[in-house]
Image (cartoon, grey):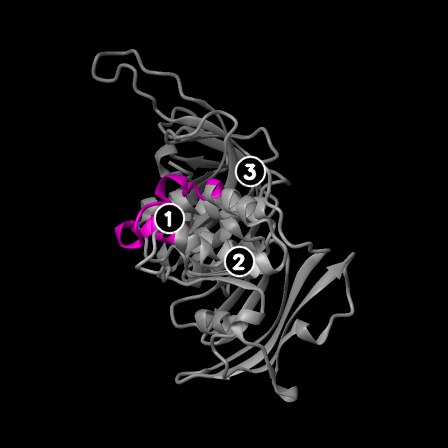
Amino acid sequence: MSAPRLPAVHGTPQLTVDIRRKLDRFTLQVSWCAQGRATGIFGPSGAGKTTLLEAIAGLDRRAQGVIRLDQTTAGDVVEAPSAAFWLDSARGVCLPTEQRGIGYVPQDGLLFPHFDVRRNLLAGARRASEQGVDIANLFDSVTDLLELRPLLRRPAPDLSGGERQRVALGRALMSGPRILLLDEPLASLDLGLRRRILPLLVRVRDEMRIPLLFVSHEPTEVQALCDDVLVLDRGQVVAEGPTHEVLTKPEVFPLAAARRYETVLEVTVLAPAPRHSSGPAVADREDGASVVFAGTDIALWTPPPHAAPGTRLWVGIPADDVILARDPPTLLSARNRIPAVVHSIEAVDGRLLIRARVSARTPPIAVLLTHAAREELALRPGDDVYLIIKANACALYEQA
């Protein structure tokens, strides 16, 4: 499917935020510049993430400071018109939400209950039409991308939670936005639905070519979708930068590990495992599948995916479920025994966080270890190790 025709955008939009917003429990203070395909805004509940996104969207008009969106060309900021300033409180500028050119998806979707899916999608199309976008082409692209065509006549109240979020995302895309703001769009969904919808968000990122700001308190989602991340805690910026690097910083990892930390990596399906034939109880049953880390030939055994060979998807490797060995392991039930090099060792919350690199093209895999285990293994950065990972411990993120 070809990407839809959207308003011409030259270069990459650069969002500059320098604001203060006093809240009941703390003051949100953010000075930050986002430029790229997808940027995460990560932190625990109550950290100020939604308040920041609402200030950017113009839904919270009590923030003070500057918010502007500029186009860049070859790294240089183009001289922008005054309309690039969404907020400049010193000059009394605060553009209404509808003039900022954003697509906004809140946590609960907020569909029009008296409309069916088709009418909900088209409700956001007026701005795109005014910009000269071919609405019919955009509608076809959005419905195909988000797999909404079978739902077009469905009344909004009859949709499931996952379907509602897909329609809300589609309506935001139908407005032809310059930037897409997603406020925890998967938070209300169960784990199975989150794993299936997350790849749709990645497809939106890659095929629609619209910059994303993605609010989440789930490090799994942020790793799969975002190149960079801004971490907030009690309204303050804790860290920012490349996603995998930032989430494993000692000052950030305890926040990221609050719900059990997984290293999320892009992989490609190779082939299903051989079928068993040792007896009727296990005949014709697949053990799992072989996938390879993106850009490498390093294989990993996982549970069976719902995907054909060659399909791109994501795997989560829990830091608690990785065992380290100094010598090549033999006679183990675990299917994965991957050579790696210790990249770094950091103390976090009474244990040690080991970042082990399996390839220069793959972000390091996080491993949690006790101090006693580290001493017994005499581990130092640069040491060769083996990562022992059970296939069933690997979580696949894919479309069903």
Give yes or no for residue 151 being in the magenta stretch: yes
The span picked out in magenta is 144-166
Numbered disc in front, either 1 or 3: 1
Disc 3 marks which residue?
340
Of the residues under marks 1 and 2, which one precedes in the sequence? 2
Give the CA separation, mark 1 to mark 3.
30 Å
Disc 1 marks which residue?
194
The amino acid marked with disc number 3 is Ala
* Residue drawn at point x = 43 percent, y = 72 percent: 47
Label 1 environment density (alpha carbons within 10 Å; few <14, some 14–19, many ≥20) = some
Relative to the observer, which residue lies in front, 251 or 301? 301
- The quarter of the picture where residue 178 lies is bottom right
Give the CA separation, mark 2 to mark 3.
46 Å
Residue 162 percent location from the top left of the image? 34, 49
- Judge whether 244 appears above or below 339 on screen: below
- The quarter of the picture where residue 179 lies is bottom right
Residue 276 percent location from the top left of the image? 32, 15
